[in-house]
Amino acid sequence: MVSLGLEDKVIVVTGGNQGIGAAIVAFLQELEAKVAYTDIKISDSNNGALGIQADVTDLSSMEAAAAEIEEKLGPVYGIVANAGITRDNFFTKLESTDWDAVINVNLKGVANTIKPFLGGMYERSEGSIVGISSISGERGNVGQTNYAATKAGVIGLIKSLAREGARYNVRANAVAPGFIDTEMTKAMPDKVKDKITAEIPMRRFGKPSEIAWAVAFLLSPVASSFITGEVLRVNGAHHT
Ligand code: NDP
């Protein structure tokens, strides 16, 4: 039988309480990984995955989460840095608090997520890191200077980590979703959503499960063992 080789691998997903993160948690559980997720709020809906309340903007909170995860589940093999927020506005109107909030969660939060686990991964010569970027980080988007800057930053961080981690057999890749049906995009006005849908060659938003498949592929020590420093676009040909 063919397998992605994720059985019993300990994998951490940030922002796993809802949306894309929850879909990744559920799918990794189907693949029989040992899954932990962190979020600001934790619900009981993730079928037995270990949920830990932790704020990605706070390094000490993420260090405490990392210690608890490794104590309860064992050494971490995979990290999915997924937590992210939007605070959209035209740049001329963007408040500096909204700039800082998005940078802190989407960029500093990714660094805070990875840092506590990386030394152990290097020591064990095994690991796969997936950062969730965005179509906006690659092509920019009106009203998203802050968000796009962080998502481009995730790509730079991941590509650098790929180069640093290669000698330790620790891979790092990014997934860049297009527009996906989650709470984040539900907040958009219908008129805007219709306009975007018309621009997408596949004429629809993606599903969270479609991102989960891409993430599982990049985590897999079998399927993607020689892939590192890449950005995998999942966007219905919206940006190629
Ligand atoms: P959601 O808003 O549905 O989920 C994001 C999760 O992250 C929420 O549970 C949220 O908690 C949590 N979160 C927010 N801030 C923090 C924090 N400081 N620490 C820990 N957890 C936090 O978003 P999506 O599922 O849509 O997005 C997931 C990722 O995918 C994000 O990085 C996003 O930028 C990216 N993405 C999404 C796209 C889309 O179209 N949906 C497109 C491209 C990329 P709470 O709700 O309580 O704030």
Image: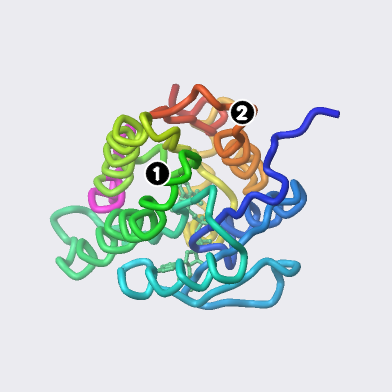
Please state the extent of the stretch shown in magenta in the rendering: 138-148
> Which numbered disc, 2 or 1, marks the residue that appears first in the sequence?
1
Residue 51, percent from left and from top: 59, 72
Which mark, by number, is residue 233?
A: none
Q: Residue furthest right?
A: 1
- Does residue 131 belong to the magenta stretch? no
Q: Is mark 2 within 8 Å of ligand 1?
A: no
Q: Amino acid at mark 2?
A: Met
Residue sitting nearer the eye, 7 or 31: 7
**Would you identify the image quadrant in which residue 60 lies?**
bottom left
The residue shown at (33%, 56%) is 115
> Dot 2 corresponds to which residue?
202
208 or 75: which is nearer to us? 75
* Residue 176 screen position, x and y as percent: 45, 37
- What residue is pinned by disc 1? 122
Q: Is residue 195 visible?
A: no
